[in-house]
Image (cartoon, rainbow, N blue to C red):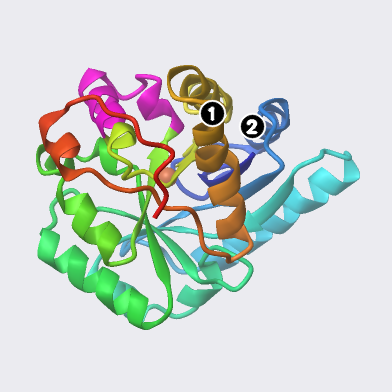
């Protein structure tokens, strides 16, 4: 599997606290069958001077550790950007996008946001040939209440990434129910772990989510969400979309249509 969203670099954000946590997380990634990990430190307006340099230092240290100890997982550098209008003014911003050609941008929503402003930002990113990926929409209460906005954003070219822990119930019943509804409605394009530490929000959840999708949907759907689409993002290729069902999204009717590709 390829995991495009996690926080294994220690001492950077709210992810791994020290190197022992990083090392444990990397072991768990291998154990879970992950071949490639993208480090996605949080980028927001509270970044302190020296943040980018620190990320590079810890990333290189981790890479050296993997090579010296023959640990079979490749690491890549990306970011998780708190979406606001200031992102276009940031220096070095383009160095931390995802994919071989730096054309995918992983973003999270601020606590308070307006749908129209997010739509504008998606539009502006697409003008720059950057494809935005919304991290864990199922965790947003505002989106849980108005999920049809996802279809608008998808039609604008935005991808949707679900957290593995969400479908396993790590973030509560409401989030799990929304996760099921989103999967049934074809609005999720890929899974990622969003791992922060070895104990709970870890890489094993990604393995668990793949098993869940295989059991409750099928192997092909699990493979697209956990292998094919994340791997293609890393290669800067386009991904598979599903036909979306707005009625299903609103009404919470169960319906499964994996065979319909756009
Ligand atoms: Fe994250």
* Dot 2: element: helix
**Does 144 lie within the magenta span?**
no
For the point 66% across and 33% down, which residue is it? Answer: 29
Mark 1 → mark 2, Cα distance in angstroms: 7 Å
Q: Residues within 10 Å of mark 1 (few under 14, many from 20)?
A: many
* Dot 1: element: loop
For the point 33% across and 30% down, which residue is it? Answer: 256
Q: Quadrant of residue 106?
A: bottom left
Q: Which residue is mark 1?
A: 202
Q: Considering only vertical position in the picture, is 35 above or below 48? A: above
Q: Residues within 10 Å of mark 2 (few under 14, many from 20)?
A: many
Q: Which residue is mark 2?
A: 25
Query: Magenta: predominant secondary structure element?
Result: helix
Q: Quadrant of residue 167?
A: top left
Residues marked 1 and 2 touching at CB (< 8 Å): yes
Q: Which stretch is magenta?
A: 164-181
Say which quadrant the C terminus sits in.
bottom left
Say which quadrant the N terminus sits in.
top right
Q: Considering only vertical position in the picture, is 175 above or below 243? A: above
Query: Where does residue 122 sit, x and y in percent of width and height?
Result: 28, 69
């Amino acid at each position: 599997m390829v995991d495009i969203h996690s926080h294994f670099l220690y001492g950077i954000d709210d992810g791994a606290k020290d190197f022992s946590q990083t090392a444990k997380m990397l072991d768990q990634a291998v154990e879970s069958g992950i071949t490639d990990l993208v480090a996605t430190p949080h980028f927001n307006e509270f970044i302190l001077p020296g943040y980018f340099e620190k990320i590079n230092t810890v990333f290189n240290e981790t890479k050296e550790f993997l090579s010296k100890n023959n640990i079979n997982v490749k690491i890549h550098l990306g970011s998780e950007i708190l979406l606001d209008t200031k992102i276009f003014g940031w220096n070095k911003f383009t160095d931390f996008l995802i994919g071989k050609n730096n054309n995918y941008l992983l973003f999270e929503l601020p606590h308070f946001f307006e749908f129209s402003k997010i739509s504008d930002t998606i539009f502006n990113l697409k003008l720059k040939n950057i494809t935005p990926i919304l991290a864990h929409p199922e965790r947003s209460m505002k989106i849980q209440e108005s999920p049809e906005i996802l279809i608008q954003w998808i039609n604008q070219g935005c991808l949707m990434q679900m957290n593995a822990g969400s479908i396993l119930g790590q973030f509560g019943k409401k989030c799990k129910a929304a996760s099921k509804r989103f999967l049934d409605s074809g609005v999720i394009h890929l899974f990622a772990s969003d791992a922060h530490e070895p104990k709970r929000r870890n890489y094993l959840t990604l393995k668990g989510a793949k098993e869940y999708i295989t059991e409750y949907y099928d192997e092909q759907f699990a493979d697209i969400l956990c292998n094919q689409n994340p791997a293609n993002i890393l290669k800067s290729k386009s991904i598979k979309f599903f036909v979306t069902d707005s009625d299903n999204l609103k009404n919470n009717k169960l319906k499964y249509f994996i065979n319909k590709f756009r």
